[in-house]
Image (tube, grey):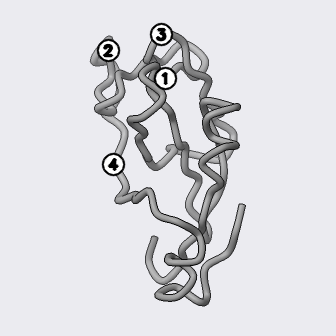
Amino acid sequence: IGKESKAFDWNRLKKEKIINETVGNQPIVLALASDTVSFFAFERPNTSMKFRIENDVLKADTLQFNLKGENLDKTSPNLRKLKAYQEFWHSWQTFHAEAKKY
């Protein structure tokens, strides 16, 4: 995000299913689909909004989003998608030496 990057441990994401974190000054959420292979990254609207995942639906307070980031009740904007890649840490670090690790 901007000039900031952060690596997240795949095994931790598989265990937790969702990670609410900040990259630079941007709050983000990573979510693992129920197939345990597909994952998604979105900007969170603010740091106080913490997501959980249930049946491939991202939930925060009364808001619900599918894994495309679309608001299911259409009352607020969709989540903004972020570019995210699954890659081995040693490979990522070679090209992103400044990256932080979660």
Q: Residue at x 54, y 73 (%)?
A: 5
Disc 4 target residue: 81
Disc 1 target residue: 58
Say left or right for 73 vs 92: left
Q: Quadrant of residue 4?
A: bottom right
Q: Residue at x 39, y 22 (%)?
A: 65
* Residue type at tag 4: Lys
Q: Find residue 59 and report its horizontal and vertical position in percent.
A: 53, 19
* Residue type at tag 1: Leu
Marks 3/1: CA distance?
8 Å
Is there CB contact under 8 Å for labels 3 and 2?
Answer: no
Ranked by sequence position, the earlier of labels 4 and 1 is: 1
Say left or right for 53 vs 71: right
Marks 3/4: CA distance?
20 Å
Ranked by sequence position, the earlier of labels 4 and 2 is: 2
Label 4 environment density (alpha carbons within 10 Å; few <14, some 14–19, many ≥20): some
Marks 3/2: CA distance?
14 Å
- Element type where label 4 sits in the image: loop
Marks 4/2: CA distance?
16 Å
Disc 3 target residue: 55
Q: Quadrant of residue 93?
A: bottom right
For discs 3 and 1, the disc positioned in front in the rendered view: 3
Closest to the observer, 7 or 27? 7
Q: Find residue 54 and report its horizontal and vertical position in percent.
A: 54, 12
In this view, 71 is above or below 47: above
Label 1 environment density (alpha carbons within 10 Å; few <14, some 14–19, many ≥20): many
Q: Quadrant of residue 90?
A: bottom right
